[in-house]
């Protein structure tokens, strides 16, 4: 009897253990993507942040040692990056946000490998770092969106992650996590997913996107610390005396950002026919020409416009007259030329640098308008909002990147007003319009190359 009882007890324990094992296995199948994915996104975002700093240092050292070298290596570098992108990583051109939007909105997830894939994530990372190392006016934040979306999308079709809804949720989560980890701004990541990426679908309040953003942001926080992107500022505004600054920043930032957005769309959709024909036949020469133009601008500005613009932006937030008067317009032109070339790279950080330059100009012209740092912050938010037409994301990014929570209402006001102003100049939202280049596009083959040079 004792043996029978012992056998029964062992069987019961074995059954309970097997039941526990099955539950654990089921939990892992359901949750592994939402654990492993954001960890990978966070690690890659941190790697890109460190790599970008390293690439920028390389460029600065090279320019200091050989001041005229950009006239040689920038045209060659732009042509090489354009060739590598088109030949080996088609779909990696530009910021990657339009590709992510197109992948979300497509109705056939099986035909998005040319937009989101591990190959594109790796290739885009390397190409973007290559662009920064030669001084292109590009940023890493937009590329991190496509990279994060590619990582999360790679889990689609595994275990319980089937169907279109799961695919869209994975892409949204990866893209939001990419923004959050790149800027160290989790609220901005969530808002970007809602405001820009999710216009056609509903993002649930208890969505796993929230957990993905939190976990990827946590990885960034652990490895890089609780830093603010452009430093911290305790500047504040008195609404009773600073209404003029808010109005001027809204109008000027809205107009400048609207012009940039319209020019970006024009380079992709409305090039003159002779120029369009030349790009189709001699795309690499066009990229080299863009590199040469950028090198000339860089030499004329003593290298101020090379790179994403993190350091000049931080300097002008912390010190009056830290930038030359021409920085804003020069950075505007450099960013437009870099984007037109078709190389991999985003416009978030360069746009913030342009806004900082314009804000510095306004503060110099009207020194009694408001504190210098306040004018720069307002113009950065206004210009970014006008370019992207994402006002909520813009003012949240500015708050989280500079620790300026006391500027909430002024930043919110200029972001909304500038976005509205931009609509009169560039009616179509930039990223949504650019995504049309990728809607319905299938995987290119060696015999049918697809031109993605200006599809940003």
Image: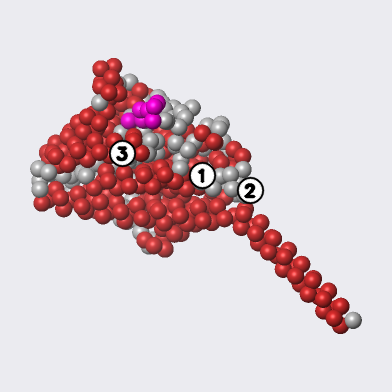
The span from disc 2 to disc 3 (Cα, nearest Å) is 36 Å
* Of the two numbered discs 2 and 3 in the rendering, the one whose residue sits closer to the viewer: 3
Would you name the residue on which mark 3 appears? 84
**Residue 122 drawn at (x, y percent):** 38, 47
Nearer the N terminus, badge 3 or badge 1? 3
Q: Callout 2: helix, strand or loop?
A: loop
Q: Is residue 324 left or right of residue 355?
A: left
The tag earlier along the polypeptide, 1 or 2, is 1
Instruction: Judge the density around disc 2: few (<14), some (14-19), many (≥20) Cα neighbours within 10 Å.
Output: few
* Camera-side residue of 250 and 70: 70
Q: Which residues are magenta?
A: 446-453
Q: Residue furthest right?
A: 1
Residue that badge 1 annotates? 153
Instruction: Give the residue drawn at x 65%, y 61%.
Output: 24
Q: Looking at the rendering, which quadrant does residue 85 occupy?
A: top left
Label 2: which residue?
Answer: 160
Of the two numbered discs 2 and 3 on the same chain, state the one appearing first in sequence: 3
Q: In the figure, 110 relative to 423: above or below?
A: below
């Amino acid at each position: 009897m004792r043996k029978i009882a012992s056998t029964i007890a062992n069987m019961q324990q074995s059954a309970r253990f097997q039941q526990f094992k099955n539950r654990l296995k089921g939990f892992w199948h359901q949750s592994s993507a939402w654990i492993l994915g954001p960890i990978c996104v966070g690690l890659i975002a941190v790697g890109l942040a460190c790599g970008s700093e390293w690439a920028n240092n390389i460029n600065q050292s090279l320019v200091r040692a050989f001041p005229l070298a950009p006239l040689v290596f920038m045209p060659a570098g732009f042509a090489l990056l354009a060739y590598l992108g088109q030949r080996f990583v088609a779909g990696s051109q530009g910021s990657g946000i339009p590709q992510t939007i197109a992948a979300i909105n497509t109705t056939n997830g099986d035909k998005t490998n040319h937009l989101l894939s591990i190959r594109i994530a790796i290739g885009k990372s390397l190409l973007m770092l290559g662009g920064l190392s030669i001084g292109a006016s590009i940023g890493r934040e937009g590329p991190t969106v496509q990279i994060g979306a590619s990582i999360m999308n790679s889990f689609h079709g595994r275990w319980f992650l089937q169907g279109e809804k799961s695919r869209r949720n994975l892409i949204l989560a990866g893209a939001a996590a990419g923004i959050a980890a790149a800027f160290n701004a989790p609220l901005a990541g969530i808002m970007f997913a809602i405001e820009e990426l999710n216009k056609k679908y509903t993002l649930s309040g208890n969505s796993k996107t929230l957990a993905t953003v939190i976990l990827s942001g946590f990885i960034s926080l652990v490895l890089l610390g609780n830093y603010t992107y452009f430093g911290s500022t305790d500047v504040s505004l008195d609404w009773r005396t600073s209404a003029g600054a808010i109005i001027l920043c809204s109008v000027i930032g809205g107009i400048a950002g609207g012009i940039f957005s319209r020019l970006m769309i024009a380079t992709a959709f409305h090039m003159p026919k002779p120029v369009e024909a030349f790009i189709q036949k001699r795309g690499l020469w066009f990229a080299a020409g863009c590199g040469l133009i950028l090198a000339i601008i860089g030499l004329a500005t003593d290298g101020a416009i090379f790179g994403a613009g993190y350091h000049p932006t931080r300097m002008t937030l912390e010190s009056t007259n830290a930038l030359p008067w021409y920085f804003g317009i020069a950075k505007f032109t450099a960013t437009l030329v870099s984007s037109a070339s078709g190389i991999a790279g985003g416009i978030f950080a360069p746009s913030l640098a342009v806004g900082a330059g314009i804000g510095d100009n306004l503060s110099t012209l009207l020194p009694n308008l408001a504190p210098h740092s306040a004018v720069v912050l307002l113009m950065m938010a206004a210009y970014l909002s006008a370019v992207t037409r994402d006002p909520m994301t813009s003012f949240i990014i500015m708050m989280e990147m500079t620790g300026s929570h006391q500027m909430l209402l002024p930043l919110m006001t200029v972001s909304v007003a500038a976005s509205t102003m931009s609509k009169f100049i560039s009616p179509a939202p930039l990223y949504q319009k650019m995504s049309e280049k990728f809607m319905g596009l299938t995987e290119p083959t060696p015999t049918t190359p697809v031109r993605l040079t200006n599809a940003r």
